[in-house]
Image (tube, grey):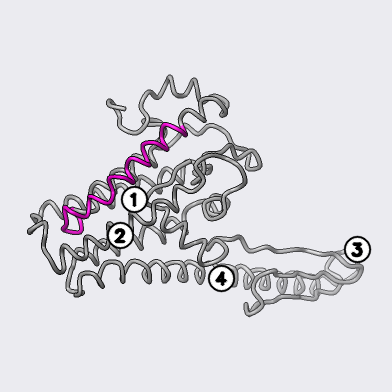
Amino acid sequence: MASGWFAIPDFVGALSGRNPLWPVERRFTFQPRRRVIRHNARRNCRGPDILRMGRASSKAGLPIKRRANAHTRMGIAVAKTQRCGHHIRMGRIAIRLGILLGLFIPALFLPAGRVDLPFFWVYLGLLLMATAAASRLIDPDLLRERVHPGPGGLDRNLRFHAIPFIAAHLIVAGLDVGRFHWSGPVPIHVQWTSMVFLGTSMGLSMWAMRANRFFSPVVRIQAERGHHLVTSGPYRWVRHPGYAAALTMMLVGGPALGSWWAMAPMIPLMMLILRRVVIEDRFLRGNLEGYEAYARQVRYRIIPGLW
């Protein structure tokens, strides 16, 4: 379970409708003298919605050649259906990324009053690549949970509480770097180092989501999804790697953009994340089987050797 910087992509996913990796459903129905393949994708998907195969079984008495042709046609239809589903998923990812750009570009560049800010573009590129990679690599069932969490649980609105702080972070960075220069010039090596930490933290967050298919934005036991303890991946070293990544991104985001003042709006959000760590750890100790023993084995919550 985790939230943090990926609250914005989750919120974008909610805006763009169903999850971009919502699985393509196929239903096979059997009728006495034909086999019908129905593809339950969008109506504008140009694929073989219904393929009539006649008698496709040996019991039907068809010659071998006709049966082979029928099965070949069925294979082609299924392949086209799979390509159609892939196009739908890619279209939803593109919509999600378009909404993300529509939110972040005005928040950064309108306050700045200019677009010739290369580190702003590098920052946006990292965010877009991380969002696209997460949409492609993470378990589709987990992405549905992140966009539309199941009922119950604690601290359900943290990701929405995070949005005003992230917006203020971007706006202050734009005003500082583009117009008023409150921070003065941030050394170029500090910006590049911060950008590397930012990208690394995004990678850590995706690794945690890849390892833990119960990485929900809500503190809850996902009994309907077979929730169990996860100890692989980054969970071998800390109990909450997603929060560790989120906190790192909040610390380095301002210097990466070139603004020390942009760190100020993130301080209250960091306090909310630390509060969530305490709430979630206590909840899992009391409700998730095996977590108490795991907590004794992996002693640190987010920072190895410290806490």
Q: Does the segment drawn in magenta span residue 163?
A: no
How many residues crowd around disc 4 within 10 Å: few (fewer than 14), some, or many (20 or more)? many
Residue wearing tag 1: 202
Across and down, in percent, residue 296 comes to 43, 19
How many residues crowd around disc 3 within 10 Å: few (fewer than 14), some, or many (20 or more)? few
Q: What amino acid is labelled 3 in the image?
A: Lys
Q: Are marks 1 and 3 in contact (CB under 8 Å)?
A: no
- Give the residue drawn at x 16%, y 58%: 258
Across and down, in percent, residue 1 comes to 48, 40
Disc on res. 59:
3
Q: Can you tell which quarter of the image residue 172 is in? A: bottom left
Q: Are marks 1 and 2 in contact (CB under 8 Å)?
A: yes
In terms of sequence position, does the residue under pointer 1 or pointer 3 come before the other?
3
Residue wearing tag 4: 88
Across and down, in percent, residue 44 comes to 63, 80
In terms of sequence position, does the residue under pointer 4 or pointer 1 come before the other?
4
Q: What amino acid is labelled 1 in the image?
A: Met
The span picked out in magenta is 255-280
Q: Secondary structure at mark 3?
A: helix
* Relative to 106, 296 lies left or right: right
Which one is closest to the eye, mark 3 or mark 4? Answer: 4
Q: What amino acid is labelled 2 in the image?
A: Leu
Give the distance between the C-alpha atoms of the residues marked 4 and 1, in whole angstroms.
26 Å
